[in-house]
Image: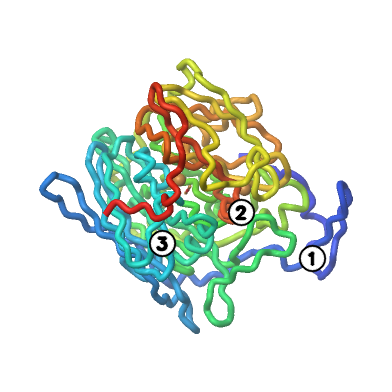
Amino acid sequence: MKRRKALKWTAIGAGGLGALAVGGGGALAYVWSNAKVDTVGKVDFDTPLAIPPEAESETDSAGSRVFNLDIRAGRTQFKPGPATETWGVNQDYLGPTIRARRGEEVAFAIANGLDEETSVHWHGMHLPAVMDGGPHQAIAPGEVWAPQWTIDQPATTLWYHPHPHGETARHVLNGISGLFIIDDDRTDELNLPRTYGVDDVPMIVQDRKFDDAGRFETTQPFMGSQGWMGDEILVNGTLGPYHEVSTRLVRLRLLNGSNSRLYNFGFSDDRAFSLIGTDGGLLPEAWETDRIQISPGERAEIVVAFEPGETVELRSYPADFGYFGPFSRVNGGDDRFDVCRFRAADSLADDTEIPSAMGTAPDVDGGEVAEERSFTLSGMSNINGESMDMQRIDFGVRVGTTEVWEVKSNDAYLHSFHVHDVQYQVLSVDGEEPPPFLRGWKDTVFLQPQKKYRLAMRFEDYTDPNLPYMYHCHILVHEDRGMMGQFVVLGEDEEIGTVPENSTVHDHS
Ligand code: C2O
Ligand code: CU
Ligand code: CU
């Protein structure tokens, strides 16, 4: 596969301390040196990859599957030296993997043991707005939030994370995140790798920078436009992880759980692998590639084949697309990371496959379009010229209809566009057929600057004229600065209502 860089600005003055002035619409000067991170060959890979435990659950008298989640502060020893103050769910850093089946009713008791308000949002889940866990479902310290709903979407890898108004970046950085895996009958019949933690491996990929006191650093690179960037990679909270491979085929459920960094995943020997699923489910058929680039919030499920006895690393390579000129260097576009080492046993079980037919293709494009909307993301805080206002409902969509949203990043900044409540279909990218990795169900899409993404989505149920769902940039510093809007799903004759004043302390317990 041929790969090319968007622009060769990186050739200018690599290394050395210096400031570079770039003309055009005002002088732009920045420190060039030290802006590039490269950890390839420098990671020890001496710690087994942590596998988040599967969350325990009980079935209550009504038949719901009930999970207890305790959000708490703790300390984590990521490396020698001072421990890091972290947050987690039922543990000190990150949270368990929640697993439920399509058709099942799930119920949660989520206790906030922090001394500040937070929330738990179910990223990618189709569910009522009041259960969504966005900024209007804040959980006060000491309180318990108890959402419940019925899982009604295909098998896939979703995730959960806090979404408190203006504070999401810090809460996610501190460690509250976990996977939410949905299973269904159709996928169970496929012979894909599916032994959790063995040949079906969750990988929550995050970048972090540690200061001398062991704390997560929260300084933005000079001239950076994406917020905090780390110079080391954690996978499921493990620094320098290795995973023992015992089967020929291994499925990786990759989550870009970082605040702002893009990853361009590939292997150290550039071997091919198969992309089998995206945000909302399995692809109809696998796509063979040697790179998959995902932005914050996106997931990619891949299957890779190993040879007995070999060792190979998963890496993140410099970005293949999306960066514009000198913005690349200061925003991580040229960085390279060793992510995880795979150590294959001398003999490998070989009883799974990549089926020729897997998921169902998105089919939103066939229907009648009730409304077209356009969204322009600009700067670091605006969508269509406005910043998020908790009390402002930007628009209402009508239940039972299909809409097409045309989304565009107006400048050279990177954005990652996420919509709550629905999985959407990417109809086109700048008028062209979307690339294979955007042909499955998506809830978050990386916006290459200046390109128009047409997204088709259907709003099938869960009307509420007062409580909105969010759409926003998933670069968390942008989201926190207000690059977010709110929409409601309206019943047949409903009109847009008013967000309850006290909605930030909404509690269903
Ligand atoms: Cu993953 Cu509104 O968020
Ligand atoms: Cu979400
Ligand atoms: Cu953004």
Q: Is residue 462 left or right of residue 438?
A: left
Label number found at residue 343: 3
Label 1 neighbour load within 10 Å: few <14, some 14-19, many 20+: some
State whether residue 111 is above or below residue 301. below
Q: Please state which amino acid type lies under the numbered disc 1.
A: Val
The quarter holding residue 118 reads bottom left
Which secondary structure, mark 2?
A: helix
Q: Please state which amino acid type lies under the numbered disc 2.
A: Arg
Measured from the top left, where is residue 186 in percent x and y?
Answer: 27, 33
Residue drawn at x 54%, y 69% is 43
State whether residue 341 is above or below residue 44. above
Q: Nearer the viewer, residue 476 or 192?
A: 476
Q: Which residue position holds label 2?
A: 481
Residue drawn at x 33%, y 52% is 199
Q: Nearer the viewer, residue 389 or 14?
A: 389
Q: Which residue position holds label 1?
A: 31
- Using the rendered image of the protein, determine whether residue 260 is visible from the camera's viewpoint: no
- Using the rendered image of the protein, determine whether residue 319 is visible from the camera's viewpoint: yes
Label 2 neighbour load within 10 Å: few <14, some 14-19, many 20+: some
Separation (CA) of disc 1 from disc 3: 39 Å
Measured from the top left, where is residue 160 in percent x and y?
Answer: 39, 52
Residue placed furthest toward the left: 61
Q: Is residue 217 left or right of residue 385?
A: left
Q: How is the image coloured?
A: rainbow
The quarter holding residue 56 reads bottom left
Does ligand 1 reach within 8 Å of label 3's beta carbon?
A: no
* Sequence-wise first label, 2 or 1: 1
Does ligand 3 reach within 8 Å of label 2's beta carbon?
A: no
Residue drawn at x 37%, y 66% is 141
Q: Nearer the viewer, residue 163 or 4?
A: 163
